[in-house]
Amino acid sequence: MTVLAVIPARGGSKGVPGKNLRTVGGRSLVARAVGAARAAASVDRVVVSTDDPAIAREAEASGAVVVVRPAELATDEAASESALLHALEVAGDGVDVLVFVQATSPFVDHDDLDAAVARVRSGEADVVFAAIATPVFLWAPSNEPSGGWAGVNHDAAHRPRRQELPPQVAETGAFYVLDAAGFRAARHRFFGRIEPAVVDERGALEIDTEQQLRLADALAGTIEGGDA
């Protein structure tokens, strides 16, 4: 089976300008994503889909192949799926497993990628997504006429122990491993049998703000033993 890793990294970030080229632990987010994908033994090819020449240069310097993303697929409204489908089209036939890695998650573990690929290859799942366990009490606005808030995953009138809560996870956005044929047919990242890959919560940070970028930079030495 041929395994293709695709890292979408457009240049038009609004919340954190130039985000994909900003550094965490001395390496750009693009370089970190490429490095994680290349370190995964199961990944055959690593592609960065971008509309930005500077990101393209960084991707190539990090060892990835660049797919130039058309402008209409690099807008704020364009879904990540459109970049993935375009990259698959450029790659041509023969891709069996698609690994979607997001550069905004700086601490992707290549062992987690390999484990997720193995689960899709074996037929255990069509989609495996990175997640963290969330044994928390969730609340949402109530539908009652009186208003207020109500328990979502628990009965507010009966306080269960945390370990008695139903199993649940939170999607981190770090990576998704997909059966390529199923993804081409569904044209969405979630289809068929979907399973979570529970990852280390320390590395689940996703960067959308300057504060999160500074936090990730501070965490890099702790998470990676100073070898960031």
Image (cartoon, helix red, strand yellow):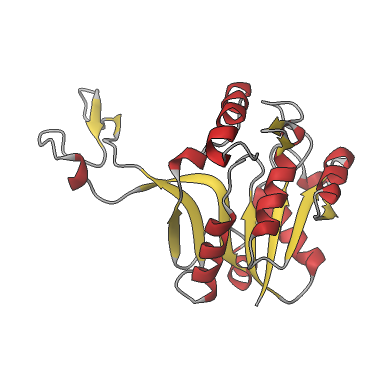
Residue 98: x percent and y percent? 64, 64
- Identify which residue, 194 or 211, lies in the foreground: 211
Q: Position of residue 201 (x, y in %)?
A: 44, 41
Task: Where is residue 202? Give x, y as percent.
Answer: 47, 38
Which image quarter is the C terminus in?
top right
- Residue drawn at (83%, 43%) of the image: 58
In the rendered image, the vertical position of residue 187 relative to residue 7, given as above or below: below
Query: Is 23 on the left-hand or right-hand side of 193?
Result: right
The quadrant in which the N terminus is found is bottom right
- Please provide percent x and percent y for residue 9: 74, 44
User: Vertical placement of 186 versus 156: above or below?
Assistant: below
Out of 111 and 141, give the one closest to the viewer. 111
Q: How many marks?
A: 0
Q: Is residue 189 visible?
A: no
Answer left or right for 152 relative to 121. Answer: left
Q: Nearer the viewer, residue 33 or 18?
A: 33
Q: Which residue shows up at 77% across the image and 30% down it?
A: 18
Q: Is residue 68 visible?
A: yes
**Residue at x 73% of width, y 77% of height:** 94
